[in-house]
Amino acid sequence: MRELKIFSGRANHDLADKLCRHLHLKPARITLGQFPDGENYCKLDEDVRGRDVFLVQPTCPPVNDNLIELLTMIDCCKRASAERITAVIPYFGYARQDRKDEGRVPITAKLVANLITRAGADRVLTMDLHAAQIQGFFDVPVDHLYAAPVINDHFVSRRFAGDEVVVVSPDEGSIKRALGHTKRLGGNLAIVDKRRTNALEVRQNTIIGGPVEGKVALMFDDMISTAGSICGAARLVHEAGAKEIHIACTHGVLCGPAIERLRDAPIDSITVTDTIPVTGEKLLPNLVQLSVAPLLAEAIKRIHHDQSISELFRER
């Protein structure tokens, strides 16, 4: 059996440390930095020849810096003769640029997938891609994990389940996700009719399904970026008479006006996972951060031992 080594980029050291603890491993030693002109520097501080290497690096903001660092780490391991290189990308940046929605625009998600593959990654481990079909952009195997079991267990522990709950999809694209949560949490399904006016602004004006009045509304999305969609949906649900509103997502990008919007919105709690670090002013009083480290650690162990990943999600 090949020796397992886990290296962390600088994007999310805490997550890498947590999953190493779950696997009873020490993070492998690596030196990362920048030259005076801003170019990235990478040096492995231990031997990887013939090893099974996992590189933990979400491509979260600053997206381009973290992406280039990941590519540099992959190339470094390849040239050091690692037996297999798995890029562990808990949050995959550029995922929203997955198609041509108008003329003369790129499909940047495909470009990034090509870069990661050509750099030398043998497989990819990621979580809650914005569009599941992005798995097909890679020419190497992709293991796609879901944070839903972690988030559902959190709400069950808070006794948010059953008839008092209504699961709200903040837009039509999240209906499948919302249905998955209703199977575990119970309650009815409601859908917010969202119309995007441009890349930055959306308009919500109708709730389909429900009822919402007097219920505890739980809203789920894959990510909260500028929080325009989720806060607009929360206001609509609040106006419809929901007694509590709790929102949850896998990836708390929280950029631009997100924090100000979340402070002002009628939201009782915000739940995110630690695929992306949440620090500083982003740590709102009503924000809860759950760890996906145990799930990622189990997936890494299964990949290392050539075992099934889909078994992790049976009946969950």
Image: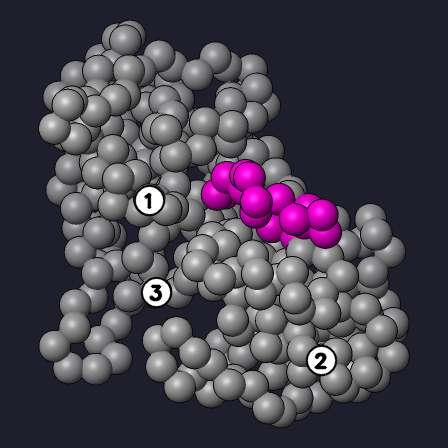
Which residue is labeled 2 in the image? 237
The amino acid type of the residue labelled 1 equals Pro
**Range of magenta residues:** 271-288
Q: CA distance from mark 1 to mark 3?
A: 16 Å
Q: Residue at x 29, y 8 (%)?
A: 46
Secondary structure under tag 3 reads loop
Query: Tag 2: Cα neighbours inside 10 Å, few (<14), some, or many (≥20)?
Result: many
Return the mark for residue 96: 3
The amino acid type of the residue labelled 3 equals Arg
Q: Quadrant of residue 198?
A: bottom left
Q: Residue at x 50, y 14 (%)?
A: 25
Q: Position of residue 34 (x, y in %)?
A: 21, 24
Mark 1 or mark 2, which is nearer the start of the sequence? Answer: 1
Q: Quadrant of residue 161?
A: bottom right
Q: Image height check: is 50 above or below 143?
A: above
Q: Position of residue 38 (x, y in %)?
A: 16, 31
Which residue is labeled 1 in the image? 62
Q: Quadrant of residue 165?
A: bottom right
Closer to us: mark 2 or mark 3? 2
Q: Residue at x 51, y 31 (%)?
A: 15
Could you tell me which quadrant the N terminus lies in?
top left
